[in-house]
């Protein structure tokens, strides 16, 4: 699947923009490595030029940056691309699991301060577990470091939602409750709860204990948020609803897609 062209598509009023460089983090469930959701490797300038052309002829409200990799695993590239994207006058959002601090945080604060007052700038910080992160996300910044990112972003006026995704069937509820408590202490803006995906070869779920998916309802679906539309099986654990109720009872807003979370902030 490598060698796919960069593709853009408006979905729910937003456009996803790729980083275009393979992610060095090691999440075991990562669905980007096969290149099905976008090109594995593309020059940043090429992505930006093609996106700027696309933006001239399409109507959309929001740019979501970083669905194919982590923008701040390569801080200079991530900051440079966000600076260019910020010039398009649309609401801006990025996804990350990086520890954002120091000069990168300063650069984001500068982007924030240069945006027009009606433009929102939000972030999604992803976690799929807490105590199990060493095994599930072995080369990824720790959950504690990601909470530091949340606090840092909130401090410079970039609301950070916690993307609890993928929701994993072998992780105990207590671990998810702990994650939610930590995220609320860090001041997060709310939670986006998401399913687990599996491709036909089951590469994204091969790390799960045997039989972990046997009781989870799965449905083959065309992935609408990717302009490349892979067909995967979507596993939605019924415990997600319990996590939603728990988060809400602790005062954390819950959303079922990042688009909904961003839109709620724009509308507020
Ligand atoms: S941070 Fe995202 S892109 Fe990087 S390995 Fe983890 S899931 Fe994949």
Image (cartoon, rainbow, N blue to C red):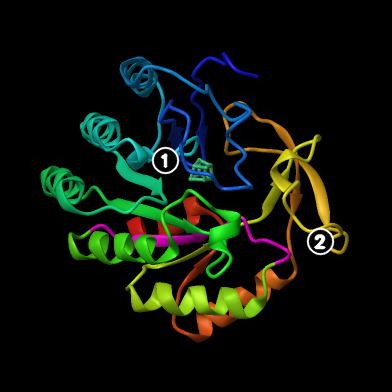
Q: Regarding mark 2 in the picture, which secondary structure is present there?
A: loop
Q: Residue at x 73, y 59 (%)?
A: 236
Residue that badge 1 annotates: 70
- Determine the image quadrant of residue 261: bottom left
- Determine the image quadrant of residue 144: bottom left
Residue that badge 2 annotates: 212
Label 2 near ligand 1 (CB < 8 Å): no
155 part of magenta stretch: no
Q: Which mark is residue 137?
A: none
Q: Residue at x 62, y 39 (%)?
A: 31
Is residue 117 something one can see in this rendering? no
Q: Residue at x 36, y 24 (%)?
A: 55
Main SS of the magenta segment?
A: loop
Q: How many marks?
A: 2
In this rendered view, identify the residue nearer to me: 196 or 204: 204
Q: CA distance from mark 1 to mark 2?
A: 28 Å
Report if the CB atoms under discs 1 and 2 are less than 8 Å apart.
Answer: no
The local crowd at label 2, few if under 14, some if 14 to 19, many if 20 or more residues have their Cα within 10 Å, is: few
Magenta stretch: give its range: 158-170
- 190 with respect to 81 (left or right): right
Looking at the picture, how far across and down is residue 186, in whole percent? 33, 73
- 100 with respect to 65 (left or right): left
- In the picture, which quadrant includes the N terminus? top right
Is residue 73 something one can see in this rendering? yes
Looking at the picture, how far across and down is residue 264, in whole percent? 41, 60
The local crowd at label 1, few if under 14, some if 14 to 19, many if 20 or more residues have their Cα within 10 Å, is: many
Q: Residue at x 24, y 62 (%)?
A: 152
């Amino acid at each position: 699947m490598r060698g796919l062209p960069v593709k853009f598509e408006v979905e729910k009023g937003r456009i996803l923009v790729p980083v275009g460089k393979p992610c060095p983090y090691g999440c075991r469930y990562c669905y980007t490595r096969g290149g099905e959701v976008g090109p594995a490797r593309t020059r940043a300038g090429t992505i930006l030029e093609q996106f700027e052309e696309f933006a001239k002829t399409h109507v959309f409200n929001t740019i979501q940056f970083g669905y194919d990799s982590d923008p701040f695993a390569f801080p200079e590239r991530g900051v440079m691309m966000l600076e260019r994207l910020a010039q398009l006058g649309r609401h801006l959002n990025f996804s990350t699991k990086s520890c954002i601090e120091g000069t990168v945080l300063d650069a984001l604060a500068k982007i924030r301060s240069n945006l027009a007052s009606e433009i929102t700038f939000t972030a999604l910080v992803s976690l799929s577990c807490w105590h199990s992160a060493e095994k599930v996300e072995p080369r990824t910044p720790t959950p504690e470091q990601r909470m530091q990112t949340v606090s840092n972003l909130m401090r410079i006026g970039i609301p950070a939602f916690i993307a609890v995704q993928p929701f994993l069937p072998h992780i105990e509820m207590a671990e998810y409750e702990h994650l939610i408590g930590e995220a609320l202490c860090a001041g997060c803006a709310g939670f986006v709860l998401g399913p687990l995906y599996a491709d036909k070869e089951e590469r994204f779920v091969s790390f799960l204990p045997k039989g972990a998916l046997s009781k989870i309802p799965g449905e083959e679906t065309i992935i609408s948020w990717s302009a490349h539309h892979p067909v995967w099986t979507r596993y939605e654990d019924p415990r997600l609803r319990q996590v939603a109720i728990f988060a809400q009872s602790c005062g954390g807003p819950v959303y079922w897609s990042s688009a909904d979370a961003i839109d709620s902030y724009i509308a507020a």
